[in-house]
Image: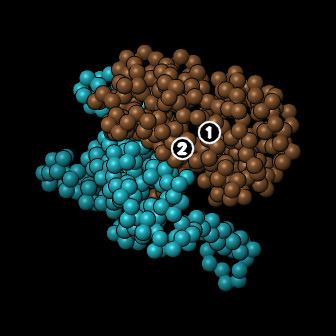
Chain colours: A cyan, B brown
Amino acid sequence: MRRRRPTAFGVLLTLALALTLGFLTLPVVAIFADTSPRRLVDSLGDDSAQEALWLSLQTTVTALAVIVLVGTPAAYALATRTFPGRTLAITVIELPLVLPPAVAGIGLLAALGPQGILGPALQDTGLVLVLQTAGVVVALVFVAAPFYIRQAQASFAAVDPDWLHASRTLGAGPARTFLRVAVPAARPGLLAGLALAWGRALGEFGATLMFAGSFRGITQTAPLAIYDRFATDFTGALALSAVLVGASGTLLLTVKLASGPGAFGAAR
Amino acid sequence: MLIRRRPRTLLTVLALAVAAGGCSDDKTADAGGGGELVVSAATSLTNAFTAYGKSFDAATARYSFAGSDMLAAQIRQGVRPDVFASANTTLPDQLFADGLVQRPTVFAANRLVLAVPAKAVKVRSLSDLTKAGVKIAAGSPSVPVGSYTRKVVAKLGAGQSRTILANIRSSEPDVGGVVGKLTQGAVDAGFVYITDVTATKGKLRAIALPARLQPRVAYSVAIVKGADHVAAARAFVAGLTAGRGRRALAAAGFEPPPS
């Protein structure tokens, strides 16, 4: 790969990289540059800003717990079992990755809304999702789960089958093998998937607004609060944005450090 | 091999995450473009303006519909549509005072109503809104429909208004959000414009507000300073007060501007 003398192609690569970096970092830098740190901190003292951040934390953590509990065994099944329709199942699970949030919102309403397919059944059980915090969690699980499951599946598939086999030969049951061998071996990948899912959940907007609505303290998560403030309080919107940038950046960095250089790949 | 491939998968997923997060419903199309007239307009004008645009000859009208407050904030942030049409007079007046738009013209009036799903029986009158367990959707306080709603509720007296405000379960960014929550049956009632109820073609039913509670709902339009297509913008605004735009507004249920 490496040449002593810069070639035209090398210059092209450098330019492309510089352009990419500049374009992707500029909006993020602007969030911090557009106002003083002092004013950012001040507008975070606002009750509704704190409520929005707190709600975002609660709903994303709850959503992640659901995703991990159900998604981990599901991903393991996809990685280690062959069954008819497996490719179809993988495609269906990955579909929300590329769905526009507005489509997710409409879909959730059509499925779980008061007039949705399961609406009457939900009503009978007394479970209300629309306009409730639980509805936010449902929306977050829907949009974020594929990010975790996809990564988890790849990580389980990368675990040496001989280890699983050895564990079984040594007398461990399939459940024990899953918990004691497969999960620890796949841990860096699972953590990386978790962070990506968390980042996606933190940023969720469209599906939440359409399915769960926007109400302070109940359904108005940080991204919705940012949108709500845009018209009246641009600095406040910037401040909340800065927190989300910080949180998402920290998530990504944590994964990089936790999973070592191998997980993201060093140049070789 | 598998370990070497993992970073690629990760980056792909990350790219998708960023893409998915970024494409949240972007109702506001980019401004600019040759030979086109870019109009930022209140959500409640969607049907009337779309119809007007089809018969408008001077240019191809391209619309960005959203809450008026959102559109005004975009103009403050440097977005330059040619025309800004708001569901109130306050926002264009403020932009005019700040030198961002030309002198606004009031071009239409509307009526605020209480809307309920057509088949629902839970809410039959304004006083039903105080019942426990009634779910109401309203515009957020900064969008005109939300500001009108709060004016109406405030006139009902401290006790009633507090109970009603406590029943508001969602603060929507524009009137379209309120209509959506109503047609999906997520709420029992919501305050929208009479033209919105008409546009749902029977899905919603309007409960008229008593005259003493009815706020003055006037729509105002202004040409944005620095607009790229001033001649077409003038023709568009002129047509709203006398011409095809006026007729499209009337067909959608808007009233002539208050004199």
- How crowded pointer 2 is (Cα within 10 Å; few <14, some 14-19, many 20+) is rated as many
Locate residue B93 relative to residue A205 in the image: left or right: right
Residue that numbered label 2 is attached to: B143
Q: Quadrant of residue A159?
A: bottom left
Q: Quadrant of residue B44?
A: top right
The amino acid marked with disc number 2 is Val
**Position in image of residue A72 (x %, y %):** 29, 48
- How crowded pointer 1 is (Cα within 10 Å; few <14, some 14-19, many 20+) is rated as many
Name the residue at 51% across, 58% down: A233
Q: Earlier in the sequence, mark 2 or mark 1?
A: 1
Label 1 SS: loop
Gap in angstroms between the C-alphas marked 2 and 1: 9 Å
Name the residue at 54% across, 44% down: B143
Locate residue A210 relative to residue A177 in the image: left or right: right
Residue ranking furthest to the left: A171
Name the residue at 45% across, 30% down: B190
From what the image shows, is residue A47 above or below residue A36?
Answer: above
Residue ranking furthest to the bottom: A4
**Position in image of residue B207 (x %, y %):** 48, 21
Is residue A83 visible to us here? no
From what the image shows, is residue B213 above or below residue B200?
Answer: below
**Position in image of residue B120 (x %, y %):** 40, 18
Q: Which mark is residue B87?
A: 1
Mark 1 falls within which chain? B
- Residues at circles 2 and 1 in contact by the CB criterion of under 8 Å: yes
The amino acid marked with disc number 1 is Ala
**Position in image of residue A227 (x %, y %):** 50, 51
Mark 2 falls within which chain? B
From what the image shows, is residue A227 above or below residue A37?
Answer: above
Q: Determine if marks 2 and 1 fall on one subunit.
A: yes
